Amino acid sequence: MNERAAMTSASVLTKTIPLKSIRFNEETNPRQDLVQDRVSFFQELFQTPDHNVPPLEVLLVQGGDPKSAIYLILDGIHRYEALKAIKASDALCNVHTEPAYTLSDLEDKKVMGLILEMSCIYNVNSPLPLTREERIGAAVRFHDLKYSLERIAQAVCAPSRTVRRWLEDINRYEKEELKETILAELKNGAAVNELARKYKGRASELTIMRWKKETGVGIEDGGVTKWPSGQNDTLPKGAWNLKPPKPLIPGELPDTGLPTDEGPPSGSDEDSQREEEQQDRTAATLRQIDDLIAKLPWSGDADDYIIADHLPRLAKKSRTLKTALSAGGISTAYEDLRGTYEDEKKKHAETKATSVERQRRIEELEKENRKLRSDSKSSDHSREWARKVVHQSLSGHLDILGLLRSAIIDHRITNPMKRVTTVPKEADPTLNDIALACSYRVVAHLEWAGLHHLENDKSISSFYDFLGIIESFPMVKDKDFMARVRKLDKQFSSK
């Protein structure tokens, strides 16, 4: 079937068609919304003798027999709705019999696109032109069917540059929505390769790597505070401001500097009232603390803080609690904690001599390193010189890849003098081979820079620019190539 079949056919018959055989299909018609005033206008005209309303433009779609044939509306949806509103049995139509389609052809998206193209040409020249949104919607559908920019512009009757801007705006909006979705899933722990498979065809693994690097998702867990030991239990920020437990002297309780329940009560009624109010506030505060503790996740670290800090402080304030703990409960727990501290102190003492020796060796190595750095300043192979050479080479290869991408996608190359050279499609295999060789050179340069610790902000930036360029090349499907790219991403994302 010829995709470039004529949009207007000479095989047109004007005849009356039963209204029940006429169909409006949103996939083959650019109209999205009905203008009710126009429908009402046609209702009045159809009820007037000699109304002279133009026929509907319809396309014949053959079925297995003449009775099963249907007629798709190309132009005239408002007239069709007006006829339905006045309960008309038939409609005068211009029946297009070519291109010839059958009901089974309507399952082909390409055929639906050709019918939509015919419908657009009629509707853009209608007394009620298509709205901007309707033309953009049709342009997007044509773009999904791989129509050329010039063909889309002709169908929706708009300049090519305008259509390009429409498609770029739509693509940018959809990409931003997709980016937000993927970043949210990355933040929830999803892996890059899993998301690449999930959104295959919409976001490549390379793109997700770049988004992850740009936004820093996964680097920080904002909004939570971790236990000092680094355990997995987390608390909302500000829920409990933990400080390291204070060292205790065995047998003694810490002096908090706060009043306790010891001492004679005040004699005045005013003092008694203030004391009762203070007691009520204390009780309310303790209830709030109890509610907070009930909701907190717990861990061994929390036990250490309770034993070494909170219980001794409470025992200092409460004689009842002090009496209850005097049997040895807190003392036993404290001695266990103290024993752990002494063990750690012993380990530290044992490693002190090793640390001194290690520090001496580090100083010797630093001295040798300073000497090497001093010697390298006068050498043509200094680290800065090597970084500069790597960056220059990477820049040149990225420029070449950019030209190759333009040649494959746009089939043209623009030189610095703004002169455009057309590249035939037959050259695509050769251009892809050159791009593959160039890409391996870029990866090798970056791997060499990482091996010799020469990576810097420029090389890391060049890597993520490289990811954006090669997305349209077939080498991204090569497993060995992508394995090396993932290794580089893991290395650079930690910088």
Image: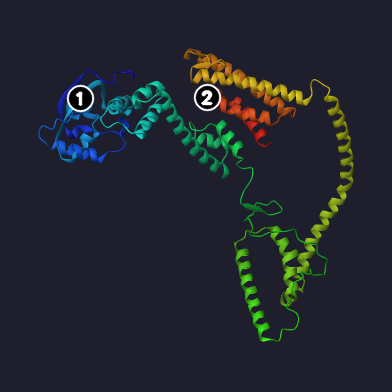
Where is residue 451? Give x, y as percent.
73, 28
Q: Quadrant of the C terminus?
A: top right
Give neighbour class at mark 1: few <14, some 14-19, many 20+ (Cα, 10 Å): many
Q: Residue at x 52, y 24 (%)?
A: 472
Is there any visible trace of residue 189 in the rendered image? Answer: no
Q: To which residue does mark 1 refer?
A: 95
Where is residue 356? Give x, y as percent.
89, 44
Q: Nearer the viewer, residue 408 or 341?
A: 408
Q: Is residue 463 depicted above or below 403 in this figure?
A: below
Q: Residue at x 75, y 23 (%)?
A: 386
The residue type indicated by label 2 comes to Ser
Give neighbour class at mark 2: few <14, some 14-19, many 20+ (Cα, 10 Å): few
Q: Residue at x 62, y 52 (%)?
A: 224
Q: Is residue 229 depicted above or below 119 in this figure?
A: below
Residue 84, label in figure: none
Is there any visible trace of residue 42 in the rendered image? Answer: yes
In the structure shown, which secondary structural element does the residue marked by tag 1 occupy?
A: strand
Q: With 361 as the anchor, is 305 left or right in this view?
A: left
Q: Quadrant of the N terminus?
A: top left
The residue type indicated by label 1 comes to Val
Residue 472, label in figure: 2
Residue 343 placement: quadrant = bottom right
